[in-house]
Amino acid sequence: MHSHSSKPLLVYDNDCDFCRYWVAQWQHITGDRIDYAPSEEVAAQFPEIPLSAYESSVQLILANGTVFSGAEAVFRALDNALLLWCYNRLPGFASVSEGIYRLVARHRPFFSALTRWFWGTHTEQTAYYISRWLFLRALGCIYLIAFLSLWVQVHGLIGSNGILPADQFLTAVHQQVGTSGYHAVPTLLWLNPSDANLHFLCAGGVALSLVLIAGFFPTIALAGLWVFYLSLVSGGQAFLSFQWDVLLLEAGFLAIFFAPLQIRDTLTRASQLSSAFLWLLRWLLFRLMFASGFVKLASDSVWQDLTALNFHYETQPLPTWFGWYAHQLPEWFQKISVLGMFAVELVVPFLIFGPRRLRTAGCIGLIGLQVLIILTGNYCFFNLLTIVLCLLLIDDVTWKSLLPKRFIPSFESVGGSPHQYWRVCVVVVAMLLFVLSSIRFGGQLFREARLPDLAWVRPFRSVNTYGLFADMTESRPEIIVEGSNDQITWETYEFRWKPGNLTDAPKWVAPHQPRLDWQMWFAALQGNYQNTYWFPNFMVALLQNSPEVLQLLAENPFPETPPRYVRATLYDYHFTDIETQRSEGTWWSRERKGIYCPTISLR
């Protein structure tokens, strides 16, 4: 057939809403490589094509006169190499795809309604410039919280006079494994493990966080933040061994390649973003949420019989007073809440990969769960970081409909694209990270499968597995630490945030994380001090009145001279009920279980 154009021409039925919508979407993908025209306008130019053909399928007319129709015309117009290869080489693929095309063509009103429901009525090009801008600044805020929260505690935790000195830890690592320790414990503290360097890493992290929030040198700032925080986490030992620490490192590492290569990231001049790393960040959110539901359902009977929330609010590490009230709710409500949680963690994550409106619905569900967790428990910046990842589920069209117009500046896309070597690097790194994360995720879901161990990548904490509360704690052991000068009168060391005094209401402390208070919860679960390697160091610090360690506590009952003796007693704590709280003013009740650490003193 003779073609009147130097470019391929896709002819479609302009009377069909379904056709008009998808042609508008394809135009964004093909650009000026293909011309589009409604059959009502150009059918007379191609008398060789019967009018019935235009009504049943789109027609792709190449410059040489070759005509393709149906699914093959769509695949060729979009220039999708994978689909074309499957169409031409994979047995049965062509007939199945054409069958699906004919099914849709015969029921276009139904699928048109379905399209409007799932994708909306907007035909603008799907873009995520606003989402990236918000995500990077929110990630900068999370980094700022993480560094500030740690900075006020770091000397008491891992300083030279802290509970687990980083310099002693690195010396022991080097003595045991030699130069292999540089890979096993990747940290800048190898250069200088002094208190001054700990101070420098925290201060540097704060400074870089502010640079990222301001939008300057985003790629460089993110790389520096990742290196600094990895250095602290690697040297932090038990006190920086939490899932939100590694989640921040993984999200921060992906963000290095997702950020624009610009001196300053602004909405008024937005550079091309990496679709590969956008999907990797969504893949991270999916793994985080789905694994959290999977490990609960697969590991513990109290999750399976829906009774976990009967215990959770009072046995979690640091409850809130809102959690105290949630604990009072009837059992039927707790079971319904568990079902809702499983729906959000096991079903909603699949909406991450759906069309616009399903992604938006998934975003609302995921954020809603995080808000409820924030109200009932103190989990540092974990829930905030999860919400930040959810921002990438919303495209610019949705943002423009949600935000007031005065907050949406007019922006233009910066011409050109990153250097070829950088693009190749991004693609290679994205493929590698997807393979590594899939292997680790598969190993978590299918434990009997013999997948590679990937031990070499674990020290960098940027390809991780997730899942909180796989084993629900059904009781709350609590350690009460006391000091004395005569072993008759004992004074209690009060912590800032963990339960102790029965009349103190559970507090809100997130997004700050009191890492000693958190570790006291884990220590109590071990039964005695011999199973908690850092606890004797903590007790010795109390006997020495170490100012670095004591500043982690609410008060020091021996301000002048240190006590001669210290001990730790184990209690079983429970929430009181509403009637008891109103009559006695107590939020907790407790029962003595025994000695956690016997009376000790310095020789």
Image (spheres, rainbow, N blue to C red):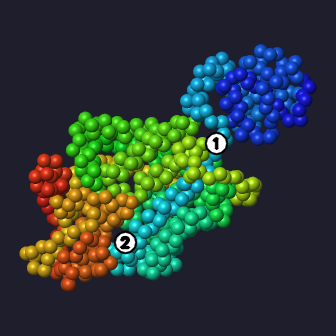
Q: Where the C terminus falls, by quadrant?
A: bottom left
Task: Say which amino acid is labelled 1.
Answer: Thr
Quarter location, residue 53: top right
Determine which quarter of the picture holds residue 16: top right
Q: Would you name the residue on which mark 2 appears? A: 153
Task: Pick whichever of labels 2 and 1 is earlier in the sequence.
Answer: 1
Quadrant including the N terminus = top right
Q: Residue 126 carries which label?
A: 1
Residue 129 in view here = yes
Residue at image position (83%, 28%) is: 61
Tell me the amino acid under the disc marked 2: Gln
Disc 2: CA contacts within 10 A as few (<14), some (14-19) or many (>=20): many
- Whether residue 313 is situated above or below residue 77 in the rendered picture: below
Q: Distance between the residues labelled 2 and 1?
A: 44 Å
Residue 209 percent across, percent down from the top left: 52, 66
Q: Which of marks 2 and 1 is in front?
A: 1
- Where is residue 89 shown, x and y percent of the image? 73, 31
The total of numbered circles placed on residues is: 2
Name the element at disc 1: loop
